[in-house]
Amino acid sequence: MQLCREYRIPHSFFRGHGDGTWSDLDRRKATALEEYLRLVCPSCGTRADEWDEEAGGDEDAYRATTQRCIGCQLIADKQKTVPEGDEGHGVKIGLLPTSVYAALQLQKKHRH
């Protein structure tokens, strides 16, 4: 259903049935997914019902874990070098594959 949502196509069409028009069942499925997504916390990705024992949930439904993303670490480290004030406004930090970065550096070197 997530792919159907992203590509804005009926679920029946995704499954290879129909002509791409939205059936009543397709609309009900799409509406149910939207309702589900509306209830998902944008920060942690859980829903209140998953924690609420009265709603069939469990207060121990999830465990917090720690993981490190080296890409995020590199971005955070580089972000520290962005100047304060006007000089740093609008500066964005991103990641490029090393091969792409090397090609860009080589291209830049040959332009000068």
Image (cartoon, helix red, strand yellow):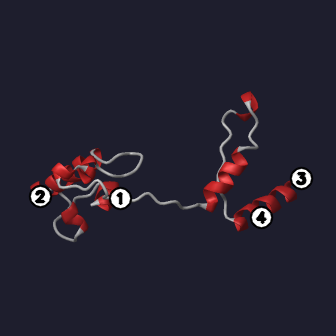
Q: Position of residue 106 (x, y in %)?
A: 82, 62
Label located before the other in sequence (4 or 1)? 1
Marks 2/4: CA–CA distance: 51 Å
Label located before the other in sequence (1 or 2)? 2
Q: Position of residue 20 (x, y in %)?
A: 21, 60
The residue located at (26%, 53%) in the rendering is: 50
The residue located at (44%, 57%) in the rendering is: 64
Residue type at tag 2 = Leu
Q: Which mark is residue 1?
A: none
Q: Which residue is mark 4?
A: 102
Q: Secondary structure at mark 1?
A: loop
Label located before the other in sequence (1 or 3)? 1
Marks 1/2: CA–CA distance: 32 Å
Q: Position of residue 3 (x, y in %)?
A: 32, 61
Pointer 3: residues within 10 angstroms few (<14), some, or many (20+)? few
Q: Which residue is mark 2?
A: 25
* Viewport quadrant of the N terminus: bottom left
**Badge nearest the viewer, 2 or 3:** 2
**Badge nearest the viewer, 4 or 1:** 1
Label located before the other in sequence (2 or 4)? 2
Residue type at tag 4 = Ala
Pointer 4: residues within 10 angstroms few (<14), some, or many (20+)? few
Does residue 56 appear to the left or right of 111 in the view shown?
left
Q: Which residue is mark 1?
A: 62
Label located before the other in sequence (4 or 3)? 4
